Amino acid sequence: MTISLSDIAERAGVSVKTVSGALHGGSARMSDETRQRIKEIAEELGYVTNLAARSMRQGWMPLIGVVADELITSPFATEIIRGLDGAARASDMAVFAMTLSGRRDVASVVEEVRRFRPRAIAYAAMYHKTVSLPEEFAGTVGVMINCREANERVTSLVPDEIGAAHEITSYLIDAGRRSIAFINLPGLLAGELRAAGFRQAMSEAGLNGSGERVLPAVRRAIYSDRAPSLVLSHVTELMSGPSRPDAILCGNDRVAMEVYGALRRIGAQIPDDVAVASFDNQLDIASRLDPPLTTMALPHRAMGRMAADILLSSDAVPGEVRKLPFQLVERSSV
């Protein structure tokens, strides 16, 4: 037998509107005691929300849709989705994602997400970049996660790349390192911003000039894991030159892993001869290197949680860019 709101209302001695408010977050005012009693009665009777009927009444399903811009291929996807899903579940919402790839454009994926009539839609990217949404969807997407909307029409949540680079560089300087090379990620917005933070920290310490070197991690104009690496040649040249660095900052943990290998080939010890630090905190890399890697952890889970809060509270300021801080993870490489 299907249990209705009326059945619960009759047992609880309240109105159907009150029951709906207790179970579905409606506008009815009630005490916490009444809300809890209604929930207990609903559970006792075996009430299951009719999502289709609820959708017809409200015009939306209790869902948050995510346009995933190659996000599922990223090791950080889990953290963004976990943060988003955890906050959504607290409001009785579920999260689903549709993947955007080279063969599917933004418009078609957004339309596919809209077919499910979600309460809200987020756009999440694999890495920090600028995204141009079609004009007709600027009002449909409620928040951008790990990316910026090119025309500043949507609230964007991004990592504070400049702040993170400034912090990790200052950490190296405070540890007594004075000649720091940065093997960076060419062609990426994250790399550009991290280089700015690195140079800012070096300048503030009076170490810009000969003590500051920024080198590309790969031969191509845009960084990718599949591009021909320049790490070995850079490390070999740096460590055999007249002004050897006493620290190498890496664009990400994968680059750091290559730096470790290159230093071992030439017999350099970490951190005695040269300190190594990085960005990302990919645990399967950073914690297993020998010595474990000091790195800046990306705020992906925090971005997911904040995105849900914005979408469900309508706390969005079109065009606002909110920068979330990284977290320094100290290990033994400095």
Image: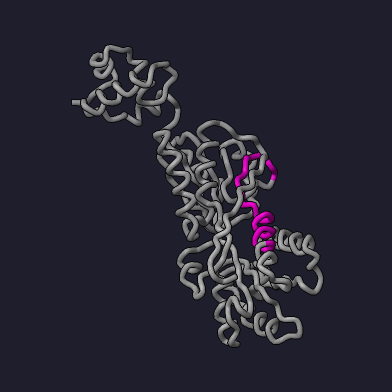
Q: Is residue 44 visible?
A: yes
Quadrant containing the N terminus is top left
Q: Nearer the viewer, residue 294 or 314?
A: 294
Residue 240 image position (x, y, % from top left): 70, 87
**46 versus 116 height, above or below:** above
Quadrant assignment, res 271: bottom right
Residue 283 image position (x, y, % from top left): 47, 64
In this rendering, would 71 be left or right of 44? Answer: right
In percent of the image, x 54 and y 47: which residue is there?
303
Residue 199 image position (x, y, % from top left): 75, 63
In this rendering, would 199 be left or right of 224? Answer: right
In this rendering, would 20 be left or right of 318? Answer: left
| Range shown magenta | 151-170
Q: Nearer the viewer, residue 245 or 261?
A: 245
Q: Is residue 157 magenta?
A: yes
Quadrant containing the C terminus is bottom right
